[in-house]
Image: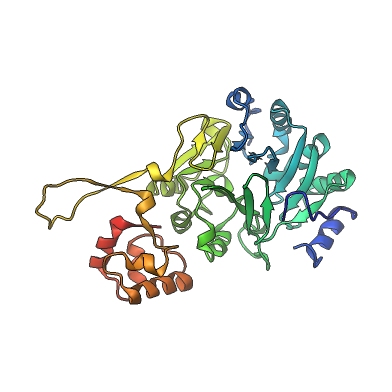
C-alpha cells in the first residue's frame, strides 16, 4: 500500500462508518505542557535521514515520524489535556500537513487530540485499528474524519506503507480474528508496525499486551529491531523476556509521565531491558527524545551513533586451554541468531550437525522462538555441554 494511493473517502457517519469499513471486503496524570525541543528546532532534518520525535506528552503517547524524503506521520496524539502542547510542537517544526495519522487504539491517552489535529492540520490519510470503542475522543475523531473528508483505512497484518526514499512501515498487528476477552481488548488489538530504512529498523507496539506478543512471536523473523518503542508505557503486561529476546533492541523508548498512578515504567520491565543490555530512554525523566538514522545505527538527541556492530562481547577462553587467559572480542554481528539462522548457518556451530539443525528449526516453528542459550535444552540431542559451547556464539 503506497501512502497516498488506494484511499477510501469517508462518506458515512461516526460508528456506522467504521463498522461498514470493518466488514467491507475491500478494506482489510499528565505533567505540564512539554517544552518545544531545542534540538529539533536548531538542527533541521536532512534529506535521506529518518527522524523520530518521541514527544513528551505526559501520561500518554505521541510520536512524529519524518521519512527520508520529508513525509510526516503522526503516531497517536496523547491525552486531551496536552493538546495545546502537541499542536505547538508540530507548528514550531513548521508543519502544515501530515501525510498520515495513525491511531494505534481507541484509548484517550493515545487519541485524545486526534480530532483537534484533524481540525488544525491537513491530513492525507487516517489509519485506524478498527476496534470500535465508545469513548468521546473516538467519536470526535470519526466526526472530524467525516467533516474533513479524510480517507480512513483499517490496519491489518500484512499491509505495507511506503513513506518514500526506501523507508516503509510494515503492519504486524492487529490481525483477524481480533483478540477478545483479554485484559484489555483495545490494547491487545493495537496497531503494531516495524519501520525499516536501509539497514535499520524501529518497532512500534502501541499498548500491546501479552496476547499480542504471543501472536507476534509466531513470525519472529519480522520482529528484530535495534530501536523499540516499548509497549504500554513500560507496563508489566508486555515486553516479556521472550519477546525482547527476539526483538533484541539496543535502544528502548518509554513514554510516560513523571508521576502516574500506574507505576509506569514497571520495575520488572526495566529489569528485563537491563538483562538484555538495552538502553532505556524515558520521556518522564529525559523529555522529548529525537532518534535519527541514515540507515546505519541510531543517534539520540544528536549523540553518538549506536550500532549493533559496534557492541563487543568479551568472551573468556575455556578453562581447559593451557594458553594464557585472553579476552576474545566477538562482534554481535558475527553471532549466529538461533531464531533466524538457516540450516547451514546452524551447522557451522560446534556440536550442531544436519540432524540437530533440523530439530532446532522445527522446535522454533512449533514451540516459538528461543529466548536464551539454556532454552536450547528443549531440543532433543542438545545437552548442557553443547549449550555451554554455544553460549558465547549465539544470540536471540
* Residue 195: x %, y % from top left: 59, 49
Query: In screen coordinates, is 319 left or right of 122?
Result: left
On screen, residue 301 above or below 71: above
On screen, residue 238 above or below 87: below
Q: Which picture quadrant has residue 213?
A: bottom right
Residue 264 visible in the picture = no
Q: Quadrant of the N terminus?
A: bottom right
Colouring style: rainbow
Q: Which picture quadrant has residue 342?
A: bottom left
On screen, residue 349 above or below 110: below
Q: Nearer the viewer, residue 205 or 27?
A: 27
Q: Nearer the viewer, residue 109 or 17?
A: 17
Q: Quadrant of the C terminus?
A: bottom left
* Residue 370: x %, y % from top left: 41, 63
Q: Name the residue rendered at 37%, 64% in the picture.
A: 345
- Counting the numbered discs, the total is 0
Question: Residue pushed farthest left?
Answer: 322
Residue 340 visible in the picture = yes
Q: Name the residue rendered at 47%, 48% in the picture.
A: 249
* Residue 280: x %, y % from top left: 47, 40
Q: Name the residue rendered at 64%, 51% in the picture.
A: 169
Query: In screen coordinates, is 202 left or right of 152?
Result: left
On screen, residue 68 above or below 205: above
* Residue 219: x %, y % from top left: 54, 64
Amino acid at each position: 500500500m503506497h501512502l497516498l494511493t488506494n484511499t477510501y473517502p469517508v462518506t458515512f457517519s461516526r460508528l456506522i462508518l467504521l463498522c461498514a469499513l470493518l466488514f467491507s471486503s475491500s478494506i482489510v496524570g499528565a505533567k505540564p505542557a512539554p517544552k518545544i525541543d531545542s534540538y529539533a528546532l536548531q538542527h533541521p532534518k536532512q534529506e535521506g535521514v529518518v527522524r523520530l520525535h518521541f514527544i513528551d506528552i505526559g501520561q500518554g503517547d505521541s510520536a512524529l515520524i519524518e521519512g527520508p524524503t520529508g513525509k510526516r506521520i503522526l503516531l497517536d496524539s496523547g491525552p486531551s489535556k496536552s493538546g495545546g502542547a502537541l499542536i505547538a510542537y508540530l507548528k514550531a517544526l513548521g508543519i502544515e500537513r501530515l501525510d498520515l495519522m495513525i491511531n494505534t487504539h481507541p484509548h484517550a491517552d493515545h487519541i485524545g487530540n486526534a480530532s483537534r489535529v484533524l481540525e488544525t492540520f491537513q491530513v492525507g490519510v487516517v489509519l485506524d485499528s478498527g476496534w470500535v470503542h465508545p469513548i468521546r475522543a473516538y467519536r470526535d475523531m470519526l466526526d472530524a474524519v467525516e467533516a474533513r473528508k479524510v480517507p480512513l483505512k483499517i490496519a491489518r497484518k500484512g499491509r505495507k506503507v511506503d513513506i518514500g526514499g526506501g523507508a516503509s512501515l510494515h503492519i504486524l498487528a492487529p490481525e483477524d480474528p481480533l483478540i477478545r476477552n483479554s485484559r484489555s481488548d483495545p490494547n491487545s488489538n493495537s496497531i503494531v508496525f516495524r519501520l525499516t530504512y536501509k539497514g535499520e529498523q524501529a518497532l512500534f507496539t502501541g499498548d500491546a499486551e501479552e496476547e499480542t506478543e504471543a501472536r507476534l512471536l509466531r513470525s519472529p523473523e519480522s520482529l528484530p529491531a535495534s530501536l523499540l518503542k516499548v509497549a504500554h508505557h513500560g507496563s508489566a503486561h508486555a515486553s516479556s523476556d521472550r519477546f525482547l529476546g527476539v526483538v533484541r533492541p539496543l535502544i528502548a523508548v518509554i513514554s510516560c509521565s513523571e508521576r502516574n498512578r500506574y507505576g509506569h515504567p514497571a520495575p520488572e520491565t526495566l529489569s528485563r531491558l537491563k538483562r538484555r543490555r538495552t538502553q532505556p530512554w524515558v520521556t518522564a525523566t529525559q523529555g522529548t527524545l529525537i532518534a535519527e538514522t541514515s540507515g546505519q545505527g541510531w543517534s539520540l538527541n544528536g549523540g553518538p551513533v549506536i550500532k549493533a556492530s559496534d557492541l563487543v562481547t568479551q568472551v573468556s577462553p575455556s578453562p581447559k586451554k593451557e594458553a594464557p587467559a585472553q579476552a576474545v572480542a566477538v562482534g554481535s554481528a558475527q553471532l549466529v541468531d538461533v531464531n533466524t539462522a538457516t540450516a547451514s548457518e546452524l551447522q557451522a556451530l560446534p556440536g550442531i550437525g544436519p540432524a540437530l539443525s533440523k530439530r532446532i528449526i522445527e522446535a522454533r516453528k512449533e514451540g516459538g522462538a528461543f529466548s536464551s542459550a539454556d532454552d536450547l535444552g528443549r531440543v532433543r540431542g542438545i545437552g548442557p555441554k553443547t549449550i555451554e559451547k554455544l553460549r558465547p556464539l549465539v544470540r536471540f
